[in-house]
Image (spheres, grey):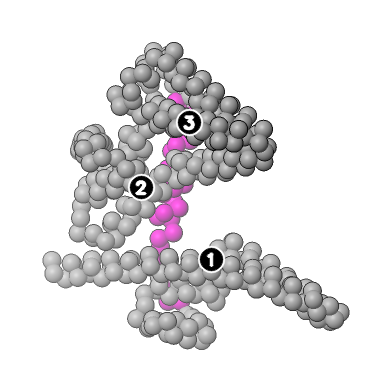
Amino acid sequence: MLILGIILTVLGFIVFQWSANAQSKSFLERPMIFNSVVAVLVINLIWLALFAGGFYSLWKVNPTIVLVILGIYVVLWIFGYFMGSEKAKAKKIFGIYKQLKLFRPKATDQELFRETARIYFSNLRWDEHKIKMTVDAIFEKSVGNKEEKDIKDVASSILIFENPQDDFGRGFDFEGYMKRHTKKQKAMDDAYNAIFGKTQKIIERPILSKNTSTWVKSIGLNPDEMSNEQLAVFAEIDDQKKSNWAVRFLYGVSFIFLIFGVINIISLEFGAVISNAIISFVFWFVGNKIQMKRISKKFYEASIMKYAQQQAEDNGKNA
């Protein structure tokens, strides 16, 4: 029963994945069999029957197996839902554009837009011919006219070509379309603010504490040669209010268990002292790891910004 359950479940997953991938494609790209309502119904019944047979066989062996599979599916579905949302996709597009703009200060907006679209579609594992046709189609419509376009317009066009869904034929639901459009626009604005809203020029030069400055020098960096944005990254170490909420939460929990440990020392409960000390250290260690990872990422972005500014200044002098 176990082998039969595994075989039926795997076959059901293969048919389901093939069907889902085919139906997610445009009308011209999907297999012709999916243009028939009866064929689609039969295919869906096949993978449902395979899954039902597989789960029934596995349930007979051990119900825990089925519950674990369903639990994994739910977790992956939730993860995929957020990763595949309009906001998450738009953030990827804006992130690619932001990196390109920093590394290629001489490039025109149109060149950056086209390269952003090409990289985004490449990450979807599209073949080069499809990418070229799609990019040409996008920019023939979105940036090929006289009206100036921005990265939001380009991102919207990219998402439309990635997964065209709106059918303007007979029975078109205009009200539903407007609701979806408003929701997509809000997601686009939120994604834009998440990527570009954090980019701001720091006028006042941050001052690091003596301990932080000594630590920065110990890892081979010179605070005197850093930009204001680079210094501001390390200033988070001195001001915990600027840290991520998860870091503050973990540090707070660590401090609470540390207090419990002190109370245990007073009451001479040495076993509890060791336990609370270990738990406190674990929470502090995880929080510190998260903070160091964030600082490393933000310092990298600030360094790229400094490099881009230097390139722009050099180009201005040579012009």
Residue at 49% from the left image edge and 75% from the top image edge = 235
**What whole-number distance in Å separates the C-alpha atoms at marks 3 and 2?**
35 Å
**Amino acid at the residue labelled 2:** Ile
Q: Residue at x 58, y 67 (%)?
A: 286
Magenta-drawn stretch, dominant element (helix, strand or loop): helix
Whether residue 189 is visible, yes or no, is: no
Asked if the residues shown at circle 1 and circle 2 are in contact, with their CB atoms under 8 angstroms apart, the answer is: no
Which stretch is magenta? Answer: 177-206
Looking at the image, do the residues carrying marks 3 and 2 touch, with CB atoms under 8 Å apart? no
Foreground tag (1 vs 2) = 1
Residue that carries the numbered disc 1 in the rendered image: 290
| Badge 1 or badge 3: first in the primary sequence | 3
Q: Residues within 10 Å of mark 1 (few under 14, many from 20)?
A: some
Q: Secondary structure at mark 1?
A: helix
User: How far, Cα to Cα, is label 1 from label 2?
Assistant: 25 Å
Q: Give the number of the disc on residue 268.
A: none
**Left or right: where 132 falls relative to 288:** left
Disc nearer the start of the sequence (3/2):
3
Q: Position of residue 54 (x, y in %)?
A: 57, 30
* Contact (Cβ within 8 Å) of mark 1 with mark 3: no
Q: From the image, tell me which residue sits under label 3.
A: 11
Q: For this rendering, which residue is in front, 200 or 124?
A: 124
Q: Nearer the viewer, mark 3 or mark 2?
A: 3
Image depth: mark 1 or mark 3 in front? 3
Q: Secondary structure at mark 2?
A: helix
Q: Position of residue 108 (x, y in %)?
A: 20, 52
Q: Which mark is residue 93?
A: 2
